[in-house]
């Protein structure tokens, strides 16, 4: 795998904390580096002990590398090391210890719904890219409120939640603003979404995410799934409206030059390749 980059971003998100700089040749934990002096950071939000976060190590001892009660602490990357009671990032050093903004020690599991359709003209014919000659895909993208970057409308898997449900729930919350609906309307929307998301889908990626919130002891992992509306009459019909941690939502052309949050651009590259679309 490519060395993580955003996990070493100099400025830790939502803070004035600066990571200890880690060069590529010092990523590996097996590489001896006595001068390594990472900064320790736990975001203030975690100090209020929200239900979605672990307590501090010492106050409890989580069962790492296993499903610990309802919390899945296994990694898609295989077994991770635990040193002095703290899990070590499987992609190596990040210049920051503690959890930063992340709730869980070790892997923090998310799911990313990649909803796509073909870009078409007024007559409904696919539009091909002038350089690659390939048809252009569009995906539902949200602008994250936390950093202002465009992203896939993904989110955290709740304890015990099936990933298939997380995909639908997060898409509904962030791209369809389901949280603002009345309970009856919400139930109706969920029924519609369930039907759409039940259609054939493609698992794009499963593993580590190069997320700027990652630390030496806590990191993001995801399952990214592509729901493709081939005929443009299912998901494409849904009224997009930003909600929850999304500030904006829109159909965006899938293209390598469009910058996206964390490793989301990599996931879209895999979708474009699978669908033989422009990249
Ligand atoms: C990324 O963070 C994942 O790929 C997913 O899109 C997202 C989940 O975190 P929140 O959107 O809940 O902040 O690493
Ligand atoms: Mg969310
Ligand atoms: Mg989210």
Image (cartoon, rainbow, N blue to C red):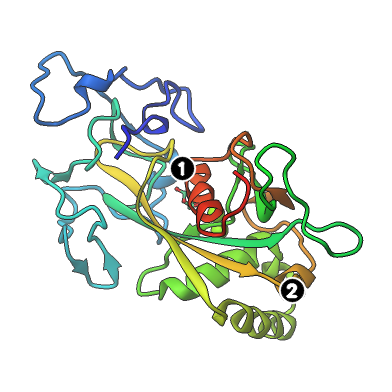
In depth, the one of 2 and 5 nearer the eye is 2
Q: Is residue 13 left or right of residue 99?
A: right
- Asked if residue 228 can be seen in this view, the reply is yes
In what quadrant does ligand 3 lie?
bottom right
180 to 17, vertically: above or below? below
Q: Which residue is mark 2?
A: 181
Q: Which residue is mark 1?
A: 263
- Label 1 CB-ligand 1 distance < 8 A: yes
Q: Residue at horizontal 8%, vertical 41%?
A: 84
First along the sequence among labels 2 and 1: 2
Q: Nearer the viewer, mark 2 or mark 1?
A: 1
The location of residue 251, given as percent across then percent down, is: 73, 54
218 to 39, vertically: above or below? below
Q: Residue at horizontal 59%, vertical 56%?
A: 153
The location of residue 191, given as percent across then percent down, is: 64, 85
The location of residue 29, given as percent across then percent down, is: 14, 31
Q: Is residue 53 left or right of residue 252?
A: left
Farthest residue, direction top: 35
The image quadrant where one finds the C terminus is top right
In depth, the one of 39 and 163 nearer the eye is 163
SS under mark 1: loop
């Amino acid at each position: 795998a490519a060395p993580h980059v955003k996990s070493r971003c100099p400025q830790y998100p939502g803070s004035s904390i600066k990571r200890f700089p880690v060069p590529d040749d010092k990523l590996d934990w097996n590489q001896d580096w006595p001068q390594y002096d990472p900064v320790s950071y736990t975001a203030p939000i975690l100090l209020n002990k929200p239900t979605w976060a672990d307590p501090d190590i010492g106050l409890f001892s989580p069962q790492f590398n296993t499903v610990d009660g309802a919390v899945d602490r296994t990694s898609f990357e295989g077994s991770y090391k635990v040193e002095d009671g703290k899990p070590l990032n499987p992609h190596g050093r990040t210049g920051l210890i503690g959890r930063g903004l992340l709730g869980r020690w070790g892997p923090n599991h998310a799911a990313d719904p990649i909803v796509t359709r073909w870009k078409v003209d007024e007559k409904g014919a696919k539009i091909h890219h002038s350089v690659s000659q390939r048809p252009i895909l569009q995906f539902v993208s949200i602008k994250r409120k936390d950093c202002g970057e465009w992203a896939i409308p993904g989110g955290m898997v709740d304890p015990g939640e099936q990933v298939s449900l997380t995909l639908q729930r997060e898409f509904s919350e962030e791209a369809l603003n389901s949280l603002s609906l009345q309970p009856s309307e919400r139930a109706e929307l969920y029924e519609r979404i369930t039907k759409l998301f039940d259609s054939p889908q493609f698992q794009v990626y499963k593993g580590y995410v190069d997320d700027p919130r990652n630390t030496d002891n806590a990191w993001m992992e995801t399952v990214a799934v592509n729901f493709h509306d081939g005929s443009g009459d299912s998901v494409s019909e849904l009224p997009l409206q930003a909600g929850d941690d999304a500030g904006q939502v829109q159909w965006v052309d899938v293209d390598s030059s469009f910058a996206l949050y964390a490793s989301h651009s990599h996931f879209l590259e895999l979708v474009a390749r699978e669908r033989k679309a422009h990249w």
